[in-house]
Image (cartoon, rainbow, N blue to C red):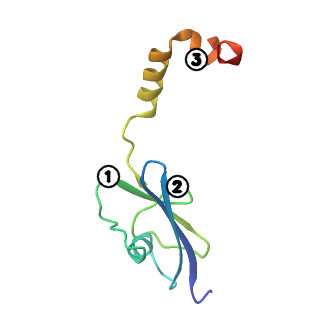
Amino acid sequence: MAERLAIVVATSPQPRQTREWALQLPPGATVGDALRACGLDPAKQGYASGIWGRAAALDAPLRDGDRVEWCRGLAVDPKVARRQRFASQGARAAGLFAKPGGR
């Protein structure tokens, strides 16, 4: 067993902005421990945590090489956003009916 766990924590505090930290944590560390080690507040409302893109609880144990992700909630449902884009572009400008070359 490794003496320290090599962990990467990634988050996007604002649109088009990312932050990443490379950490060395003791064995038995959890997702919450990793977030606190970066100065992030794991109890902050509107955020979700995960390991390698899969949802993970704050008390989930980490393994060497894990990537912890701390994600903001979605501002708009992706399905609703797609419908709004389609409605504003019109049927001929999007999807199967788009003209070649974007004309």
Q: Quadrant of the C terminus?
A: top right
Identify the residue position indicated by label 2 in the image.
54
Q: Residue furthest bottom?
A: 3
Q: Are marks 1 and 3 in contact (CB under 8 Å)?
A: no
Query: Is 97 situated left or right of 29 in this image?
Result: right
Pointer 1 or 3: first along the chain: 1
Q: Quadrant of the N terminus?
A: bottom right
Amino acid on which disc 3 is placed: Ala
Identify the residue position indicated by label 1 in the image.
46
Q: Which label sits on residue 94?
A: 3
Pointer 2 or 3: first along the chain: 2
Pointer 1 or 2: first along the chain: 1
Is disc 2 placed on a helix, strand or loop? Answer: strand
Looking at the image, is mark 2 or mark 3 nearer the viewer? 3
Amino acid on which disc 1 is placed: Gly
Taking the spot 50% from the left edge, 16% from the top edge, the residue there is: 89
Is disc 3 placed on a helix, strand or loop? Answer: loop
Taking the spot 41% from the left edge, 70% from the top edge, the residue there is: 35
Amino acid on which disc 2 is placed: Arg
Identify the image quadrant of residue 58: bottom left
Q: Position of residue 33 (x, y in %)?
A: 41, 76
Looking at the image, is mark 1 or mark 2 nearer the viewer? 1
Query: Is 6 situated left or right of 59 in this image?
Result: right
What whole-number distance in Å separates the C-alpha atoms at marks 1 and 3? 32 Å
Q: Position of residue 102 (x, y in %)?
A: 65, 18
